Amino acid sequence: MRFRLRPAIRSLVAIMLLVVVSLAANSSLATPPMNVLPPGVQYPQVQACAFLSNDVICTSIPSVRSDPNTGSNVVLRCWEVKTGNETDPFGAKPRTGSSGLAVSRDGKYLAASGDGNLNVWDLTKPFPYQTVATLKSVGSAFDFIGDSAKIATADLEKLRVFAVPSTVAAAEFPLSAENQRTMWLDVSPDGKLVVAQNIVYDLKKQREFAVIEPSEMLYAPPVFSPDSKYLAYVTLKELTVWDVANRKPSLQRTYRLTLTETEKALNFREIDTPGPILWTPDGKGLLIRTKANQLHTVDRKTGDLKQRIFSDNFIAQCYAYSPDGQHLAAGGWGEIRIKNLKTDKVTTIKLDPFPKRDAGK
């Protein structure tokens, strides 16, 4: 007996064959995502990264074991930029409990948030680095102020300023009612302004400077440009560059927020929100993660997408530029990448998976 396909089924098969041929002809599309995890295997996700110097990148990564005192399982792990070899400038991997990391603009201090507390290390002392201050119950939003050891922090009620190593606030003032769920904070490089969630404050006058956008519209933390003249942030629909002096947007650019059918067929992992944004070291562009999970630089003036950082489909959860602007580090599920921006050479650091007995716990 001869088997015959129904017309509708024959059409569907023909379409599927055309899709397969098309994908095979395009090697870039036929390449599956690089960090799609094998079934039943869990890799640690790099939660935050920051350069301690031009030679060392520091990351916060979940560990199998938790600290018996704090319950934290997030540890600081560091790698050499040139070789990709792990190094331990702390003498033992300190546990932070959260994903926040920041290095002061003069490169002298490292701060890491954890469970509402903030630990600060002095990077000018000989190895191993020692904790010089622990600020308790200050929230998880923080940033260094200018070229100094001053730190601005924000919790659900107040914005505080500390002068490390003192653990007593040198200044504090209440946040606006709309601002009392602060999740992020950024201080302008000149040390004059701070943006907490969606409100900009004048640090010297200790009062509100401007409201940039309704809080519920923000999908990525606002960040100041290197010259302190602009703020960049992402809403549900667009990237905005906000002119600080004129207190209004100077650029608004909408990007595609959904995946193409081809990308869905290739099992791209769609994300609910864009990733964090960074200014390029020269202040002429921004580094953003699109909904297709790709890192791109964007021209500040035109909003045009420029360089794509990685040619494959590596999904970066955090990223940071080195102080000299020559390297970009990016961390994701199970790996860290360090790209030399002059030579385009990429050093990949693979993280060991969690033991199977601990996976999913």
Image (cartoon, rainbow, N blue to C red):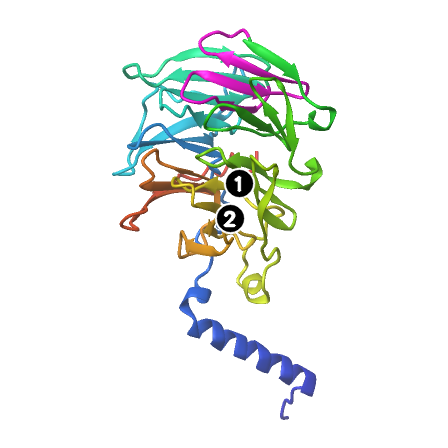
Q: Is residue 308 above or below residue 164?
A: below
- The secondary element bearing badge 2 is classed as strand
- Label 1 Cα crowd, 10 Å radius (few <14 / some 14-19 / many 20+): some
Q: Is residue 102 above or below residue 312?
A: above
| Residue 222, picture quadrant | top right
Give left or right: position of 326 versus 273.
left
Quadrant of the image containing the N terminus: bottom right
| Residue 289 image label | 2
- In the rendered structure, which amino acid carries the disc numbered 1? Pro
Which residue is at 27% across, 50% downward? 343
Mark 2 or 1 closer to N-term? Answer: 1
Image coordinates of residue 14 in percent, x first then y, are 58, 82
Q: Is residue 262 magenta?
A: no
Front-most of residues 265 and 134? 134
- The secondary element bearing badge 1 is classed as loop
Give left or right: position of 342 versus 308.
left
Q: Which residue is mark 1?
A: 276
Give the farthest residue toward the bottom: 1
Q: Which residues are magenta?
A: 139-168
State if disc 1 and disc 2 touch (CB < 8 Å): yes
Give left or right: position of 311 versus 247.
left
Residue 6 appears in view = no
- In the rendered structure, which amino acid carries the disc numbered 2? Arg
Residue 287 appears in view = yes
Front-most of residues 304 and 28? 304
Q: Is residue 162 above or below residue 328?
A: above
| Spatial separation of the CA atoms under disc 2 and disc 1 | 7 Å
Quadrant of the image containing the C terminus: top right
Image coordinates of residue 303 in percent, x first then y, are 51, 53
